[in-house]
Image (spheres, grey):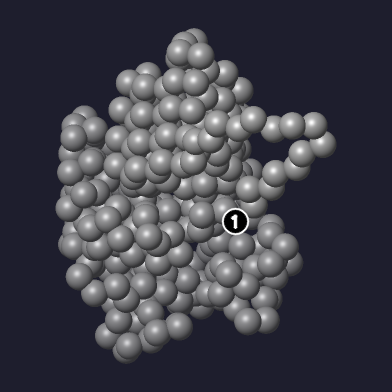
Amino acid sequence: MKAVIPVAGIGSRLRPHTHTQPKSLIPVAGKPILAHIIDSLIEAGFKDFVFIIGYLGEKIQTYVEDNYKHINSIFIMQTVREGIGHAIWMAREHLEGEDQLLIALGDTIFDVNMNGLMQIPYSTIGTKRVEDPRRFGVVELGADNFITKLVEKPAIPVSNIAIVGIYKINEVAALMESLQYIVDHNIRTKNEFQLTDAMMRMIDNGYKFVNYNVENWFDCGKKDALLETNAILLKKAELVTKDLNFENTIIIQPVNIDKSCRIHNSIIGPNVSIGARTIVENCVLRESIIGSDAELRNAVLHDSLIGNEASLRGLSQSLNLGDSTEINFE
């Protein structure tokens, strides 16, 4: 079975970081979003991958080819972004003859029992109940628990069961036929060719879909969500860096810090990730993600996202305060 990962989005909600870096390569808990997705699929036994790339796609291709030489990778360029359905349709020549297909969106980290998902005898959509489903596609279930309706980002939600961005398709030829149909007839939702519309056409034609509850789902499309995801993932022992020893520095776990970093006279943590070769001096950092090859000096940061090769120099003061003195630097 092949895994298809659409990663052509521009990541407008994460600017300015996505001006120079694809959203899927932004680091979370020590490795790019895309690496979390690929690693989980490799662990589940996947070896064949199709990546739909677009904006800054050459960086994604280089990253995958440099770090995942042991998988079979195909890269397809989506020059015009016309929706996830259009992205999957572009891969149709590479999916001919496939009995099953897994689709995983490239900006969403998921924690799912893949073995349980793969054993379901029907086409399956990963879902999770949310408080506000208007930002997501949603599913509606019938009395027999089969999916009866799919709606993309509804203004008035038909349910609060949100689609989380992972799909197992058991009838690949039928999906391709439905995608071809909506492209040929220019059937768009929110001005894009939607995967949900193609799957809804399959349901209308009698194909069975069920939903599968995903325990943890991290939509990494915004800064706050990215930092929250970083904190949650750092609860996993395998993502935490231990035995750190930096000069005159206090480490408050959990953190993920590349051991090539140079850190002096600082307090780091909790929930901080720092990329390779970054320099940190005289800083207090918490609840933040710092990229590689950055340089931070004399800074107090929290809830911050600092890109690769960024440089920040804060203020350094020498004070002599008498009794009953108050100074406020805000």
Point out residue 61 in the picture as x, y percentages from the top left corner: 19, 47
In the image shown, does 217 or 184 lie closer to the viewer? 217
Residue depicted at 66% across the width and 62% down the height? 161
Residue 154, by quadrant, is bottom right
Residue 303 visible to the viewer = yes
In the image shown, does 158 or 110 lie closer to the viewer? 110
Relative to 128, say whether 302 is above or below.
above
Residue depicted at 18% across the width and 44% down the height? 62
Question: Mark 1 packing: few (<14 Cα in 10 Å), some, or many (20+)?
Answer: many
Point out residue 131 in the picture as x, y percentages from the top left corner: 72, 63
Residue depicted at 48% across the width and 58% down the height? 221
Point out residue 302 in the picture as x, y percentages from the top left corner: 58, 42
Relative to 86, say whether 211 is above or below.
above
Q: Split into 4 quadrants, where in the image is the N terminus?
A: top left
Point out residue 123 in the picture as x, y percentages from the top left corner: 48, 57
Q: What's under tag 1, amino acid-wise?
A: Thr
Residue 32, by quadrant, is top left
Relative to 132, say whether 167 is above or below.
above
The residue under label 1 is 127
Residue depicted at 37% across the width and 60% down the height? 16
Residue 198 visible to the viewer = no
Tag 1, which secondary structure? strand
Furthest-bottom residue in view? 185
Image label count: 1
Relative to 280, say whether 231 is above or below.
below
Furthest-right residue in view? 324
